[in-house]
Image (tube, helix red, strand yellow):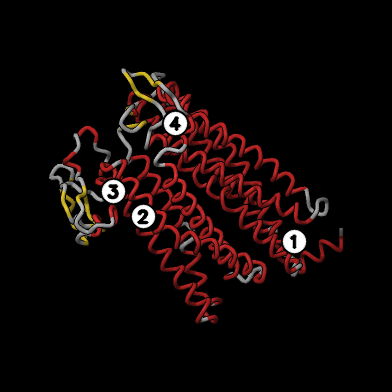
Amino acid sequence: MDDFIAARAQMALSLGFHIIFSCVGMVMPFLMAFAHWKYLKTNNEVYKGLTKAWSKGVAILFATGAVSGTMLSFELGLLWPGFMKHAGPIFGMPFSLEGTAFFIEAIAIGFFLYGWERFNKWFHWFCGFLVGVSGLASGILVVAANSWMNSPTGFDYINGQYLNIDPIKAMFNDAWFPQALHMTVAAFCATGFAVAGVHAFMIMRKRNVEFHTKAFRIAVGFALIGAFGAPLSGDVAAKSVAERQPIKLAAMEAHFETEKGASFVIGGIPDEEKEEVKYAVKIPKVLSFLVSNDFNSEVKGLKDFPRDEWPPIAVVHYAFQIMIFFGVIMIVIGAIYLYAFFFKKEWLNKHWLLKTFLIATPFGYIALEAGWTVTEVGRQPWIIYGIMRTVDAVTPMPGIQYSFYFFTAIFVSLSLILVFLLKRQIQMVPKLYDPTDAQFNDKNKKS
């Protein structure tokens, strides 16, 4: 493994882990706040226990995300000093604001965890809600920095110099809103399905059924918002990509020839040598409509761009297909659940429906990882699109492969610790969080 590949692999691995931690951190506090709101409105102690259980999970994930996020910030300087030298002054603002959001989130978590019976009940609820708002803001600000790499603006690039820097314009670049919107919706979808799957499993095992049923239904509600919102936010993102990065769009669809009335490609195996996609299902004119609302509009193909600017076509195309596939599956599952909720109430407790959500537990995060692969790999060979190539930004320091092995070990260890802690939280539900369980009541009597 040469140093350049090691640097890219390390960054990909770090982002792949951190994106899961950060997305859960963006969404779980809202589930927690909703459960707390239900407790305050109904005075049902089960919702109180659910709120406490989820709040401990939020705290665990916050700590894990803080570690992985800090590592990522160090990696930017360690692996890509050429990038940070020029880009730091331009997009430093969203990173600084993200740090502020992080501190607000940390304070709000502390207030919420230790505020039971100490604060006014609605101020206490607000602290929990603030955890979600600040976590969401933190994620959006990081996406703003990433979107600048896809749509660099806020400076003049003259003779290799970055002049007339405008950090505000850089932060609110053309890619900022589409990426932030799609990322937020995807985070709600992925986290909602993951949490619903865990609680569906516990219901199937007939453990604390009322507790986990309430948790399951809250999680499904958030999952459905994400699942049905994803096509709309994805459409906004796709139109933005078509306008700013037509070569990325062409790679997503393995679209080699410029043509009017371009077909939308489903599946297929790209052949870069023969410049064609094999075994694909093509839906005529749909791609043209998706990018411009015109069935006969022109869509540029890969052949219109220099070969040395092509991203890895197969990786981008397959990742895009994976994202679409799992996104559609989650929409179908969501539609079945809604049909059951409104027309077939008896389905809601059926084993097959719960098992469907259990199987779908990782689907959102698979789609999320695939979507980020499209975003990041589709930008290659540029680290700053059209300005700086990735190979020119990598560190000259030798031995990066050892750094890759070291960071890989850290992230795997973090993941194992996280799984252990969350599993223990679930196991403690009867004793600590479910007031309808005999173990909970026995523990309270002893105390």
**Dot 3 corresponds to which residue?**
252
**Dot 4 corresponds to which residue?**
404
The image quarter containing residue 429 is bottom right
Question: Residue at point 45% right, 59% down?
Answer: 229
Horizontal side, residue 21 vs residue 129: left or right: left
Q: Which mark is residue 235?
A: 2
The x and y percentages for residue 297 are 21, 53
- Label 2 or label 3, whichever comes before in sequence order: 2
**Dot 1 corresponds to which residue?**
431
Query: For the residue carrying disc 1, how many other residues have a C-alpha within 10 Å: few (<14), some (14-19), or many (20+)?
Result: some
Q: Are marks 4 and 3 in contact (CB under 8 Å)?
A: no
**What separation in Å lies between label 1 and label 2 (alpha carbons)?**
46 Å
**What separation in Å lies between label 4 and label 3 (alpha carbons)?**
28 Å
- Label 3 or label 1, whichever comes before in sequence order: 3
**What separation in Å lies between label 4 and label 2 (alpha carbons)?**
36 Å
The x and y percentages for residue 333 are 44, 68
The x and y percentages for residue 343 are 50, 81
**What separation in Å lies between label 4 and label 1 (alpha carbons)?**
42 Å
State the quadrant of the C terminus.
Answer: bottom right
